[in-house]
Amino acid sequence: EAQVTQNPRYLITVTGKKLTVTCSQNMNHEYMSWYRQDPGLGLRQIYYSMNVEVTDKGDVPEGYKVSRKEKRNFPLILESPSPNQTSLYFCASSPLSGTLEAFFGQGTRLTVV
Amino acid sequence: GQQLNQSPQSMFIQEGEDVSMNCTSSSIFNTWLWYKQEPGEGPVLLIALYKAGELTSNGRLTAQFGITRKDSFLNISASIPSDVGIYFCARGAQKLVFGQGTRLTINP
């Protein structure tokens, strides 16, 4: 089954404690990205990657890091989380040609206290 | 940045009613997309529009790409309980820019 898998689904952490949210896709898509969803703001792109070892900032990159060492994985790293990073996070992947449809993971609800 | 203005922000309707929502932008786009997000899930693509004036249906859903390329509409006919969720318009291909969403609630 074609899917994007994020882990964990829920996470409560404390300010300053480094964390990683993993994302994996099994569709051999070149393009992967991270979004955060906040009430009234829709989804906003944090970082994206066009292919292995190629990453770039989205609209709200501050406080986040990513890496793309393998095509299927695109982890999101918060080196020093702060309460304003409390949000619902989605990973997505899509091909660079063809239908271009983006497939989303089920989301990670992060709370930073 | 390029923003999409989606309205209404929320809708409370009776089962069986038709629904209309729209999205506008100050910029011209080549692609309009409509996604639906159900509770506890990620967004799922409903309809993609690629040409100005294009009218596309997916079951009871119909979406149109405005002639000016600055707006799009989504209609749902004869709503049913499983239509509940948040509907997002979006532009672009891989790098999606989303509207704020329309939360649809249906009273049986």
Image (cartoon, coloured by chain):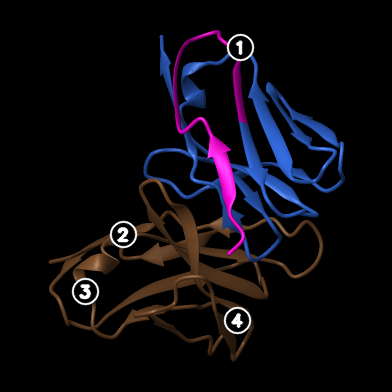
Chain colours: A brown, B blue
Q: Please check whether the numbered discs 2 and 4 fall on a single chain.
A: yes
Label 3 resides on the chain identified as A
Q: Secondary structure at mark 4?
A: loop
Q: Residues within 10 Å of mark 3 (few under 14, many from 20)?
A: some
| Dot placed on the residue nearer the N-terminal end, 2 or 4 | 4
Label 4 resides on the chain identified as A
Cβ atoms under marks 1 and 3 closer than 8 Å: no
Q: Which residue is mark 2?
A: A87
Q: CA distance from mark 4 to mark 1?
A: 42 Å
In x, y percent, where is residue A105? 48, 58
Q: Residues within 10 Å of mark 1 (few under 14, many from 20)?
A: some
Residue most extreme to the front: B26
| Residue B36 in view in this figure | yes
Q: Nearer the viewer, mark 4 or mark 1?
A: 1
Q: Which residue is mark 1?
A: B78
Residue bounds of the magenta highlight: B1-21
In x, y percent, where is residue B37? 49, 41
Q: Nearer the viewer, mark 2 or mark 1?
A: 2
Q: Secondary structure at mark 1?
A: loop
The numbered disc on residue A82 is: 3
In x, y percent, where is residue A82? 21, 74
Q: Which residue is mark 4?
A: A71
Q: Which quadrant of the rendered structure holds the N terminus of chain A?
A: bottom right
Label 2 resides on the chain identified as A
Q: Please check whether the numbered discs 4 and 1 fall on a single chain.
A: no
Q: Quadrant of residue A2?
A: bottom right
Label 1 resides on the chain identified as B
| Dot placed on the residue nearer the N-terminal end, 3 or 2 | 3
Q: Which quadrant of the rendered structure holds the C terminus of chain A?
A: bottom left
Q: Secondary structure at mark 3?
A: loop
Q: Nearer the viewer, residue A112 or B82?
A: A112
